[in-house]
């Protein structure tokens, strides 16, 4: 597994951004944007030690098998416990939410502050940086239909809800913000379906080898 090093220090994380005026004042989008921002993690400054995290995420089915065949796993907490038990066999663990946000660079999006045109799917945008590595070298999934599991939430996507719902610009991009998060209440009715496109980006447990 290809791991990159995120050097320890203090990180400014969570939602603390001001969107462009045309987004904030548009009556069609303002309330939807506020709802999306309401799902984001709170602004905070955290101190993290140096850690090593996978450059590319792996599909969760490669760790736990068929997500439709899980016995007694129907919450994110139970899922995290199960995934961590499997990853530990290779000296790995799930990232914390702080670690995943820090590794994404600490800006509005992993590529910076730019809100791209169109929607992040196929050729529906002229933007390309969401498919390229972040400033720290993380290879992004670049598609909000996909999500990444951390220790307390699902990150980097919304299962395609905003795209499928035809939400106006820039709603489809906001779930790719590192601070955006889904918790149990957001996926109760579609738990196994969400795991079809769920990925994990393991962190190396110190003093042990990676897979």
Image (cartoon, rainbow, N blue to C red):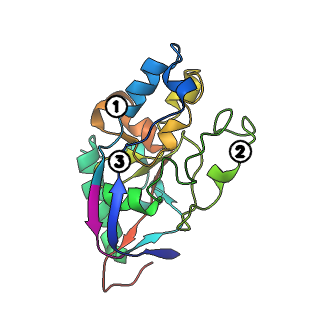
Q: Which stretch is magenta?
A: 45-50
**C-alpha separation, residue under disc 3 versus residue under disc 1:** 11 Å
Residue drawn at 75 percent across, 39 percent down: 123
Mark found first going from the N terminus, 2 or 1: 1
Q: Give the answer, above or below, for where 63 lies relative to 91.
A: above
Q: Main secondary structure of the magenta part?
A: strand
For mark 1, what is the residue?
A: 38
Q: Image quadrant for the C terminus?
A: bottom left
Residue at the farthest front position: 21
Q: Closest to the observer: 150 or 16?
A: 16
**C-alpha separation, residue under disc 2 versus residue under disc 1:** 26 Å
For mark 2, what is the residue?
A: 127
Residue drawn at 68 percent across, 35 percent down: 117
Image position, residue 207 (x, y; %)? 31, 86
Q: Closest to the observer: 104 or 76?
A: 104
> How many residues crowd around disc 3 within 10 Å: few (fewer than 14), some, or many (20 or more)?
many
For mark 3, what is the residue?
A: 14
**C-alpha separation, residue under disc 2 versus residue under disc 3:** 24 Å
> How many residues crowd around disc 2 within 10 Å: few (fewer than 14), some, or many (20 or more)?
some
Image position, residue 188 (x, y; %)? 31, 31
Secondary structure beneath label 1: loop
Quadrant of the rendered structure where residue 145 is? top right
Residue drawn at 34 percent across, 74 percent down: 8
């Amino acid at each position: 597994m290809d791991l990159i090093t995120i050097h320890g220090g203090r990180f400014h994380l969570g939602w603390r951004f001001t969107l462009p005026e045309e987004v904030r004042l548009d009556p069609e989008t303002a309330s939807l944007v506020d709802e999306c921002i309401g799902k984001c993690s709170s602004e905070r400054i955290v101190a993290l030690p140096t850690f090593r995290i996978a450059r590319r995420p792996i599909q969760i089915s490669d760790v736990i098998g068929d997500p439709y065949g899980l016995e007694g796993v129907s919450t994110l907490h139970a899922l995290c416990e199960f995934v961590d038990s499997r990853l530990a066999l290779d000296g790995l663990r799930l990232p914390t939410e702080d670690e995943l946000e820090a590794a994404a660079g600490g800006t509005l999006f992993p590529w910076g502050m730019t809100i791209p045109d169109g929607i992040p799917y196929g050729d529906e945008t002229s933007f390309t940086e969401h498919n390229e590595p972040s400033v720290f070298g993380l290879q992004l999934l670049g598609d909000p239909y996909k999500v990444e599991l951390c220790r307390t939430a699902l990150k980097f996507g919304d299962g395609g809800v905003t795209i499928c719902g035809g939400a106006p610009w820039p709603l489809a991009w906001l779930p790719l913000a590192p601070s955006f998060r889904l918790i149990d209440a957001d996926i109760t009715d579609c738990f196994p379906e969400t795991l079809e496109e769920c990925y994990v980006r393991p962190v190396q447990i110190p003093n042990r080898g990676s897979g």
